[in-house]
Image (cartoon, rainbow, N blue to C red):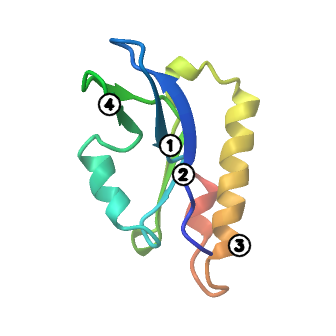
Amino acid sequence: MSAPAPQVIQLSCPNCRTPMRAQVFTLVDVGLQPELKNYLLAGQLNMAVCPNCGTPAMIAAPLIYHDPAKQLLLVHFPQQLNARPDEEERFIGDAAAALMRSLPQNAPKGYMLAP
């Protein structure tokens, strides 16, 4: 599996309303993109900075974090998304299925069944 690409979204600065584009990651697989772990831990993942006034804006997006070496799968759904339970389940199921298909056949996968 290749590294998951971020989505590019258009948003407005919460301070000065300047339009800007930002990358949004909904899947962080540190087995493929270990540098994203540092961005996440530093609070910089899914963060946009206004090119006009410099105001940072956290982008609310669902996030799946996968660390195959530690057999760790975490899911975060920001409350402000007001996602319905079926939307959350579909997102988690689709992402977990894609991750399971991407792992080597003999790799442990059971930990993904209870994120």
Q: Quadrant of residue 20?
A: top left
Q: Pointer 1: what residue?
A: 24
Of the numbered discs 4 and 2, the one sitting upstream in the chain is 2
Residue shown at the point (57%, 61%) measured from the top left:
4
Find out whether the residues at labels 2 and 1 contact each other: C-beta distance under 8 Å: yes
Find out whether the residues at labels 4 and 2 contact each other: C-beta distance under 8 Å: no
Mark 1 and mark 4: Cα distance apart in space: 17 Å
Where in the figure is residue 109, as x and y percent of width and height? 61, 71
Q: Is residue 106 left or right of residue 71?
A: right
Which mark is on residue 51?
4
Of the numbered discs 3 and 2, the one sitting upstream in the chain is 2
Of the numbered discs 1 and 3, the one sitting upstream in the chain is 1
Residue shown at the point (57%, 22%) measured from the top left:
81
Q: Amino acid at mark 4?
A: Pro
Residue shown at the point (66%, 69%) measured from the top left:
100
Of the numbered discs 1 and 4, the one sitting upstream in the chain is 1
Where in the figure is residue 94, as x and y percent of width and height? 73, 52
Mark 4 and mark 2: Cα distance apart in space: 20 Å
Q: Amino acid at mark 1?
A: Val
Q: Pointer 2: what residue?
A: 6
Where in the figure is residue 65, as x and y percent of width and height? 47, 54
Mark 2 and mark 1: Cα distance apart in space: 5 Å
Q: Which residue is the extreme one toward the front? A: 52
Q: Pointer 3: what residue?
A: 101
Q: Amino acid at mark 2?
A: Pro
